[in-house]
Amino acid sequence: MNFLARSVRAVRPVRMIRSYATEAASAGLRLTFAVPHQTIFKDVSVTQVNIAAVSGDMGILASHVPSIEQLRPGVVEVIEATTTKKFFVSGGFATMNPDSTLNINAVEAFPVEEFSPETVRHNLAEAQRLSNSAATEEEKLAAKIEIEVLESLQAAILAK
């Protein structure tokens, strides 16, 4: 019998067990939300956080399955006991840990209520004009990214 065959027989099967952070449920969801220049929330107890992930929109509660999600341009909604705060993020990552802590690191984040619908509409029209008249592929891609972000922002403003 060759070495590999003997090694395979010697290995015991690994038993996969899925577990949840049940001990963290009593403490609730702890949120840390930061951008490069500012910490918006630092280890704050919240009820729920809704994020716009590349894999789809999702709501996160205490004891959520651990995961790492890439954020797309959209809204991060933080639901506390008595208030709800909405932030528009241009992108970033959300990391849910087994101990019911959620870390959100965003490139940019601003409260949704700080945006003017008229300004967003004007900037979107300008970005679409630039996309149509772009001379190079690089200019077209830059305009496409700007359009995607502004369309997401416009949808967030209309939903508030």
Image: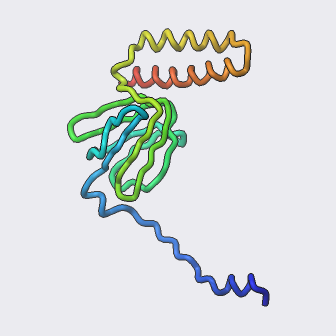
Q: Which image quadrant for residue 38?
A: top left
Q: Residue at x 41, y 42 (%)?
A: 104
Say how the picture is coloured: rainbow
Q: Nearer the viewer, residue 50 or 98?
A: 98
Please tell me which residue is depicted at 45% across the width and 36% down the height of the picture. 106
Q: Position of residue 123 (x, y in %)?
A: 51, 12
- Please tell me which residue lies in front, 1 or 17: 1
Is 68 or 37 nearer to us in this picture?
A: 37
Residue 152 locus on image (x, y percent) = 49, 25
- Image-quadrant location for residue 126: top right
Say left or right for 15 vs 19: right
Q: Is residue 143 left or right of residue 102?
A: right
Residue sitting at x 50%, y 45%? 69
Task: Determine whether 158 is above or below 93 in the image.
Answer: above
Residue 60 sits above or below residue 17 on the image: above
Image quarter in which the N terminus is found:
bottom right
10, above or below 88, in the image: below
Quick one: quadrant of the C terminus?
top left
**Which residue of the protein is positioned furthest toward the right in this rendering?**
2
- For this orientation, the residue located farthest to the bottom is 1
Figure check: 13 above or below 135: below
Q: Residue at x 20, y 37 (%)?
A: 82
Name the side, left or right, on which 75 lies relative to 8.
Answer: left
Location of residue 47 in the rendering, given as x and y in whole percent from the top left corner:
28, 45
Q: Residue furthest left?
A: 82
